Image (cartoon, rainbow, N blue to C red):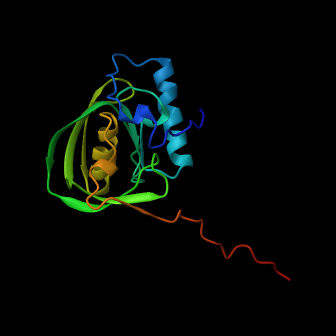
Amino acid sequence: MAIRNIREDGDDVLRKVCKPVEKMTERLSTLIDDMFDTMYEANGVGLAAPQVGVLRRIVVIDVMDGNPLVLVNPEIVEADGEQTGPEGCLSLPGLQGDVTRPNHVICKALDRDMNEITVEGEELLARAICHELDHLDGILYKDLAIDGLYKVEPVQPEESDDDFDEE
């Protein structure tokens, strides 16, 4: 497993439509592992294959609910409700924008073993699914941002009280 370079806004690969996965190969399985490692290293909750330069319909998502997801050839089959809130993206570091998304989605996909799965998500998971699936069609959240983008400060690790000297 390896950390891959995350492509940033302006890289043409982020604007291309990804090709479906016909069969799972060892190379694609390694890609999935690398995508999780890359996403965790960057403190993200989702990552799409084009963000690491691979034009395949694969996303990984982990909203820290104990259920990391691999979605191959995903498709939203139902969406309802509405939520508007800030979004960021590993491909647009230091920026956020307010985006309106469905509050509830049902997504059909294949898992890494190419078995059909259905994922139902609300709130953050629904937002992450929509955001990552947009990447597969060359859409960035900045295209949907209500009032454009704004800068945000990177999150710094909190200081710990464990760093004191006992005498």
Rendered location of residue 50, percent (x, y): 42, 33
Query: Relative to the observer, which residue lies in front, 4 or 97?
Result: 97
Judged from this view, the residue extending furthest toward the right is 167
Rendered location of residue 40, percent (x, y): 52, 47
Q: Which of the 4 image quarters holds residue 15?
A: top left
Query: Relative to the observer, which residue lies in front, 80 or 148?
Result: 148
Rendered location of residue 94, percent (x, y): 49, 58
Question: What is the tally of numbered marks visible in this picture?
Answer: 0
Q: Which of the 4 image quarters holds residue 97?
A: bottom left
User: Dividing the image into 4 quarters, which one contains the C terminus?
Assistant: bottom right
Residue found 34% across the figure and 38% down from its top: 135
Residue found 40% across the figure and 19% down from its top: 24
Residue found 76% across the figure and 77% down from its top: 164
Residue found 20% across the figure and 47% down from its top: 105
User: Dividing the image into 4 quarters, which one contains the N terminus?
Assistant: top right
Query: Relative to the observer, which residue lies in front, 51 or 57?
Result: 51
Q: Does the rendering let one see residue 29?
A: yes
Q: Does the rendering let one see residue 49?
A: no
Question: Is residue 7 toward the left or the right of residue 122 in the image?
Answer: right
Q: Is residue 89 above or below residue 60?
A: below
Q: Which of the 4 image quarters holds residue 133?
A: top left
Rendered location of residue 71, percent (x, y): 34, 34
